[in-house]
Amino acid sequence: MGSTTENTVEFYQNLGKLFYAIAASDNNVNELEILALKRIVKTEWSSFEDASQIVDVFDWLNVDQEYDADICFKNFIAFKHRNEQMFPDSTKQLISKTANEIASSFAGRNKSELIMLARLDLEFKNEDEK
């Protein structure tokens, strides 16, 4: 990624926030969403150093349950805006794939998840148009 270790850890922490926001957008994180996240991090993100931070932050937010999904989403977007170089197309595609798998893991995607996924998709598309 070409960034400092601190930025890399912060990158994965913010992904944890994003994926928590997707799962918690309907005010309920289901066990299947947690399992989907853990599976995809293990299979798709394992080649990335510090990717375990994704699950650690997700778990912490889920256990604490004091954080609003929308605030977590906005925190991710703010981090992305400050660190666009950390989001090449391949990374954006993997983020979108992960978010969609989490949302689809329990009884399909609901309205809250669809809205948040659309916001993420728009964010990535708007950046591509700049």
Image (tube, rainbow, N blue to C red):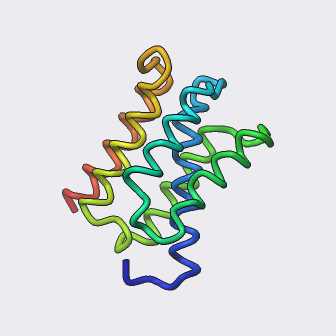
Quarter of the C terminus within the rendering: bottom left
Q: Nearer the viewer, residue 86 or 53?
A: 53
- List x then y, in percent, for residue 65: 77, 37
For the point 28% across and 66% down, which residue is it? 88
Decide which of 126, 38 is in the foreground and name it.
Answer: 38
Q: Nearer the viewer, residue 107 or 113?
A: 107
Q: Residue furthest left?
A: 129
Q: Could you tell me residue 93's position as x and y percent?
A: 28, 51
Q: Is residue 11 above or below residue 117?
A: below
What residue sits 53% from the left and 47% below the top? 18
Choose top left, top right, bottom left or bottom right for residue 35: top right
Q: Residue at x 43, y 72 (%)?
A: 83
Of residues 129 and 35, which is closer to you in this image?
35
User: Which residue sits furthest top?
Assistant: 107
Q: Quadrant of residue 62?
A: top right
Q: Is residue 81 left or right of residue 67?
A: left
Rendered view: 115 above or below 80: above
> In the rendering, at what x and y percent does residue 17 appear?
59, 50
Residue pictured at 47% horizontal, 14% vertical: 107
Q: Is residue 83 above or below residue 107?
A: below
Horizontal relation, residue 62 to residue 100: left or right: right
Total count of labels: 0
Quarter holding the N terminus is: bottom left
User: In the rendered image of this protein, does residue 75 appear above or below residue 21?
Assistant: below
**Residue 60 percent location from the top left of the image:** 73, 49
Q: Is residue 76 left or right of residue 109?
A: right
